[in-house]
Image: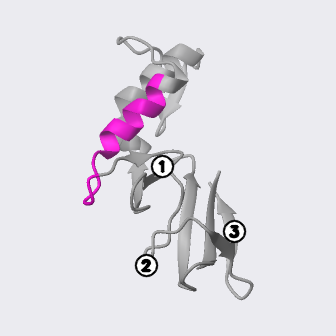
């Protein structure tokens, strides 16, 4: 489950919005160095998703309305699947890598010391 939230940096006072987690159709990753956000659509990594589904024993499986009985490739464990998503996301402009567990950072000062904006919005999404 993903979350959108308006936050305030406790170091510099910058107000900004964040997305963390992801949903049924995508993942929200962040750069491990600068905190930049990148969304990876599951459709973009379909083969990796199907390989993970094979490992989990999810077949038969519906993908966008299409019945899939099996996947001919090798299965991927959860750890291998997460790594495949991160590999697909690639390298950030700053030279860091996009990771599932990278902390959200302030785009102004790069601090991870953030708080919910009491006047902002916050909601969960899938």
Q: Inspect this view and state whether residue 59 appears.
A: no
Residue 64 percent location from the top left of the image: 46, 40
- Mark nearer the N terminus (1 vs 3): 1
Give how far apart the Cα atoms at labels 3 and 2 are. 23 Å
Residue 56 lies in the magenta stretch? no
Give the residue at the far right of this rendering.
Answer: 118
Which tag is nearer the camera, tag 3 or tag 2?
2
Residue 116 percent location from the top left of the image: 70, 75
Q: Which residues are magenta?
A: 80-95
Query: Which residue position is annotated with label 1?
Result: 26
Q: Which residue lies at the image location 39% right of the left edge and 39% below the top edge?
A: 86
Secondary structure beneath label 2: loop
Q: Which residue lies at the image location 63% right of the left edge and 61% below the top edge?
A: 3
Query: Which residue position is annotated with label 3?
Result: 123
Give how far apart the Cα atoms at labels 1 and 3 are. 17 Å
Which one is in front, 88 or 65? 88
Crowd rating for badge 2 (residues with CA inside 10 Å; few <14, some 14–19, many 20+): some
Which tag is nearer the camera, tag 1 or tag 2?
2
Query: Which residue position is annotated with label 2?
Result: 108
Q: Is residue 70 above or below residue 32?
A: above
Secondary structure beneath label 1: strand
Relative horizontal placement of residue 53, taking residue 96 as reference (left or right): right
Q: Main secondary structure of the magenta part?
A: helix
- Mark nearer the N terminus (3 vs 2): 2
Crowd rating for badge 1 (residues with CA inside 10 Å; few <14, some 14–19, many 20+): some
Which one is in front, 10 or 4? 10
Relative horizontal placement of residue 90, taking residue 14 as reference (left or right): left
Crowd rating for badge 3 (residues with CA inside 10 Å; few <14, some 14–19, many 20+): few
- Mark nearer the N terminus (1 vs 2): 1
Q: Which residue lies at the image location 36% right of the left edge and 11% below the top edge?
A: 72
């Amino acid at each position: 489950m993903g979350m959108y939230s308006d936050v305030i940096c406790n170091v510099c006072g910058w107000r900004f919005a964040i997305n963390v987690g992801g949903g049924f159709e995508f993942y929200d990753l962040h750069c491990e160095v600068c905190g930049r956000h990148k969304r990876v659509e599951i459709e973009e990594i379909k083969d990796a998703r199907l390989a993970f589904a094979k490992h989990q024993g999810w077949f038969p499986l519906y993908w966008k309305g299409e019945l899939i009985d099996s996947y001919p490739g090798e299965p991927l464990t959860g750890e291998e699947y997460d790594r495949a998503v991160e590999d697909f996301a690639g390298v950030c402009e700053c030279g860091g890598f996009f990771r599932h567990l990278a902390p959200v950072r302030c785009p102004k000062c790069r601090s991870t010391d953030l708080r919910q904006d009491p006047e902002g919005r916050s909601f969960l999404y899938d």
